[in-house]
Amino acid sequence: MSTLYITHAACLDHQTPFGHPERPDRIRAIERALEKERFTSLIREQAPMAEMESLALAHPEDYILRLRDISPREGLVRIDEDTVMSPGTYEAALRGAGGAVLAVDEVMTGKVRNAFVAMRPPGHHAERVRAMGFCFFNNAAIAARHAQKKHGAERVAIFDWDVHHGNGTQDIFWSDKTVLYCSTHEAPLYPGTGALSETGDYGTIVNAPLSAGDGSEAFREAVDTVIAPRIHDFAPDLIIISAGFDAHWRDPLASLNLTESDFAWATQKLMDLADRHCGQRIVSVLEGGYDLEGLAKSTAFHLDALMGRETGT
Ligand SMILES: [Zn+2]
């Protein structure tokens, strides 16, 4: 069984202002890391543009059309202080969501064991009707709902280990007991949500906030004692990872001190759970990660684990 890697060059055409951390070089750094010999056995596919029907699984149609309509023909349009649209943004965002949908199709039909989608802009801050925090469409949420609607998955578990809380994903699934949303994140930090007390209408939101300066030990304890037991009890039909790598110690936007080995370890934990509950099915989508070296190494370790082998360096 194999691991699928999905990306598309259109995601390099999502431009952000000079000095913005969420930049095309992020994907270039990942691509360079995956040129190594040991990644030649990855199955590679191009991310297609998501259909309106898929986007509408997580966002109302008027929100989607509004984003399309305010797309600039030239220059940049500012959505909020740090979220901007360039002429290439809308297509990049469509392909980010489309890549997540394709990953679900290939994993749920057993063509591949698991999949990683390396696209930008990221998605986990995008709420039902609000683009924010560099995000426009919530790719992880669309993937979860697509697995339910098209492939009959009853329960989907999402683990979001991006250093920022996925307020968007939490917002979308707040009243949905068929999706378990679990997050480790630094608090206090942008966007300010993700307290332990935020548990959703059915107790299917699981927040495990960490403190600035926390590293491997605190992260692994949160996964072992809080997140993994909840995913186990939930017995999902698919596990989705919101894979942000900005909790890496090198990252300039936050102050957790994880290493690439921690991401490999967490991936392995989820693979054990997926092996037990859902035929090994995992779909992982890129979220943040703003230090190019930390991002590239972490992604390589994450993929090594998904490919079922001990991580190299
Ligand atoms: Zn982040």
Image: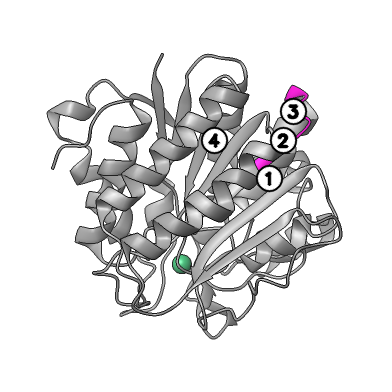
Place of residue 246 in the rendered image (x, y in percent of width and height, measured from the top left): 37, 65
For label 2, the residue is 146
Give the crowd class for mark 3: few <14, some 14-19, many >=20 residues within 10 Å.
some
Place of residue 277 in the rendered image (x, y in percent of width and height, measured from the top left): 62, 25
Q: Is residue 129 magenta?
A: no
Give the crowd class for mark 4: few <14, some 14-19, many >=20 residues within 10 Å.
many
Q: Which tag, 2 or 3, sits closer to the chain's start?
A: 2
Which residue corresponds to the image point at 26% horizontal and 42% vertical from the top-left? 300
User: SS of the residue at dot 1?
Assistant: helix
Q: Amino acid at mark 4?
A: Pro
For label 3, the residue is 153
- Disc 2 from disc 3: Cα separation: 9 Å
For label 4, the residue is 48
- Disc 2 from disc 1: Cα separation: 6 Å
Q: Which tag, 2 or 4, sits closer to the chain's start?
A: 4
User: SS of the residue at dot 3?
Assistant: loop
- Identify which residue, 299 or 193, lies in the foreground: 193
Along the horizontal axis of the image, is 283 left or right of 211? right
For label 1, the residue is 142
Which mark's residue is nearer the viewer, 4 or 3?
3
Q: Which tag, 1 or 4, sits closer to the chain's start?
A: 4
Q: Amino acid at mark 2?
A: His
Place of residue 55 in the rendered image (x, y in percent of width and height, measured from the top left): 72, 47
Q: Are marks 2 and 1 in contact (CB under 8 Å)?
A: yes
User: SS of the residue at dot 2?
Assistant: helix
The quarter in which the N terminus is drawn is top left
Q: Which tag, 1 or 3, sits closer to the chain's start?
A: 1
Magenta stretch?
Answer: 151-157
Q: Are marks 1 and 4 in contact (CB under 8 Å)?
A: no
- Residue 227 lies, with reference to residue 87, above or below; the image says above
Q: Which tag, 4 or 3, sits closer to the chain's start?
A: 4
- Disc 2 from disc 4: Cα separation: 15 Å
